[in-house]
């Protein structure tokens, strides 16, 4: 199937072709037709599935036939990075249509955002907090909105945005088409969806996420103290690759980045304590090849889209399977192959196993031949120091011995009775 089957405007098809999209992804195949008919949808789609174009293309198509000069589309996204990402996607897909969008998020001057409202750009892509601020200042005008997209709704819930979203919803015209995308559907999201959507078409494309299909997953058992040096070894082993690495906290991100810089590795950092300008500079530096490593926390994981990203490395095992999916979703984006590795200390084995159970697949354990696993505490130990004081990390660290490595291998023999959904081969492609 090709995009021309959707009978999209040729200006959109031209942009799709220039983006290099040859075939619609499963979510695009399923979502675009009902959206073109004006239906509401509720889609459970993970990151990397091509969901952004799945909603942007039909919205753009509908706007093509309408008078200009009104802000018709509102997209709500949980993070600034995701808002910027969607805005970039819009700019690329709408490049021949003259339809403009603007990203609205906190941490930067509101002046250009206020101008976008005054200019009545076709679409506003906003994080809830800044949008509410601008509404309170009577800058944000939403009375012409006809299309509402809630992206990554479950992440909005995690970040405590649901009350803000309900407040924004109260100010929107009720006559509208509403789209909700969420990786999971916890009860508060189901309740919100019930209030917000009108006879929605339910789409569930989670069984074959493109992100997961092309990715090679590996876990490296390694003591907490040796993790930073191990990352250096990984950099040496993957000479030509850039590495996006995730830590559990901002402090660990800073300490790891400091360590790498001391070792002569150029790296950027993205986390909640960095200003928007610093985040943008870090991401641009990484995309442009100035930084070989980008150190990030989960909060910043969404919305980072780097083409041809070599390796995603979980410096810390993620708290939940969902975070794992989102982190590794930064590599192997739609149809591309990618590598994901996880550094797992003995203390983190339990968490990795529960992620494996949720995902329905064991992640193979590997070692780097030649790496000195017996080395005493390395400089990296500092990567955990601040958290020790904040509780939970004060316990003496267990170290891996040969027996424990065997124990990990024994996991291979354990029978699993969980779905194969996450790692299933790319049947859909
Ligand atoms: P998303 O899930 O919207 O964040 O998209 C993930 C990535 O897939 C982005 O880098 C898109 O540019 C890319 N993408 C979206 N649709 C397609 C397609 N039909 N073919 C190839 N790549 C795509």
Image: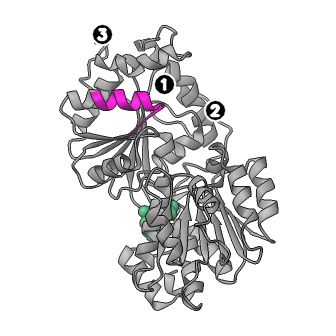
Q: Quadrant of residue 179?
A: bottom right
Residue 83 screen position, x and y as percent: 50, 59
Q: Which mark is residue 312?
A: none
Helix, strand or loop: magenta stretch: helix
Task: State which region is magenta.
Answer: 245-258
- What residue is at 65 percent from the left and 71 percent from the top? 142
Residue 226 screen position, x and y as percent: 34, 19
The local secondary structure at tag 3 comes to loop
Query: In the rendered structure, does residue 249 fall within the stretch colored magenta?
Result: yes
- Could you tell whether 191 is left or right of 119 in the image? right
Distance CA(mark 3)–CA(mark 1): 24 Å
Distance CA(mark 3)–CA(mark 2): 36 Å
Tell which circle, 3 or 1, labels the residue nearer the N-terminal end: 3
Query: Which class describes the residues within 10 Å of circle 2: few (<14), some (14-19), or many (20+)?
Result: few
Does residue 342 appear in the picture of this structure? Answer: yes
Q: Which residue is mark 1?
A: 409
- What residue is at 40 percent from the left and 13 percent from the top? 402
The local secondary structure at tag 1 comes to helix
**Disc 3 vs disc 2: Cβ atoms closer than 8 Å?**
no
Q: Which residue is mark 3?
A: 376
Does residue 365 appear in the picture of this structure? Answer: no
Q: Which residue is mark 2?
A: 415
């Amino acid at each position: 199937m090709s995009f021309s089957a959707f009978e999209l405007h040729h200006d959109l098809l031209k942009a799709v072709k220039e983006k290099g999209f040859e075939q619609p992804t499963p979510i695009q195949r399923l979502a675009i037709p009902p959206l073109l008919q004006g239906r509401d949808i509720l889609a459970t789609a993970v990151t990397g599935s091509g969901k952004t174009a799945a909603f942007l293309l039909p919205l753009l198509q509908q706007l093509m036939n309408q008078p200009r000069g009104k802000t018709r589309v509102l997209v709500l996204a949980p993070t600034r990075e995701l808002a910027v990402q969607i805005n970039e996607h819009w700019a690329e897909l709408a490049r021949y249509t003259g339809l403009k969008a603007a990203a609205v998020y906190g941490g930067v001057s509101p002046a250009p955002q206020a101008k976008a409202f005054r200019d009545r750009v076709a679409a506003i892509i906003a994080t809830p907090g800044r949008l509410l601020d601008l509404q309170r200042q009577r800058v944000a005008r939403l009375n012409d909105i006809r299309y509402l997209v809630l992206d990554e709704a479950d992440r909005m819930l995690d970040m405590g945005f649901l009350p803000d979203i309900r407040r924004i919803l109260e100010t929107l015209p009720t006559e509208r088409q509403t789209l909700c995308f969420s990786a999971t559907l916890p009860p508060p999201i189901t309740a919100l969806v019930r209030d917000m959507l009108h006879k929605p078409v339910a789409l569930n494309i989670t069984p074959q996420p493109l992100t997961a299909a092309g990715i090679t997953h590996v876990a490296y058992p390694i003591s907490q103290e040796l993790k930073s040096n191990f990352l250096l070894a990984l950099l040496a082993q993957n000479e030509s690759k850039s590495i996006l690495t995730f830590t559990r906290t901002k402090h660990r991100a800073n300490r790891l980045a400091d360590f790498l810089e001391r070792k002569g590795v150029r790296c950027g950092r993205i986390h909640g304590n960095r200003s928007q300008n610093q985040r943008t500079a870090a991401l641009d530096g990484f995309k442009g090849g100035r930084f070989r490593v980008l150190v990030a926390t989960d909060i910043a994981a969404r919305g980072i889209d780097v083409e041809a990203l070599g390796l995603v490395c979980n410096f810390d095992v993620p708290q939940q399977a969902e975070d794992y999916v989102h982190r590794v979703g930064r590599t192997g984006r739609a149809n591309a192959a990618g590598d994901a590795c996880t550094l797992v200390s003995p203390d983190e084995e339990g968490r990795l196993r529960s992620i494996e159970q949720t995902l329905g697949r064991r992640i193979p354990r590997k070692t780097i031949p030649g790496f000195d696993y017996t080395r005493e505490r390395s400089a990296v130990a500092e990567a955990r120091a601040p958290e020790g004081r904040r509780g939970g990390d004060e316990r003496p660290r267990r170290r891996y011995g040969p027996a424990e490595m065997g124990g990990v291998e024994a996991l291979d023999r354990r029978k699993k009775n969980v779905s194969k959904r996450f790692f299933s081969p790319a049947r859909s492609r």
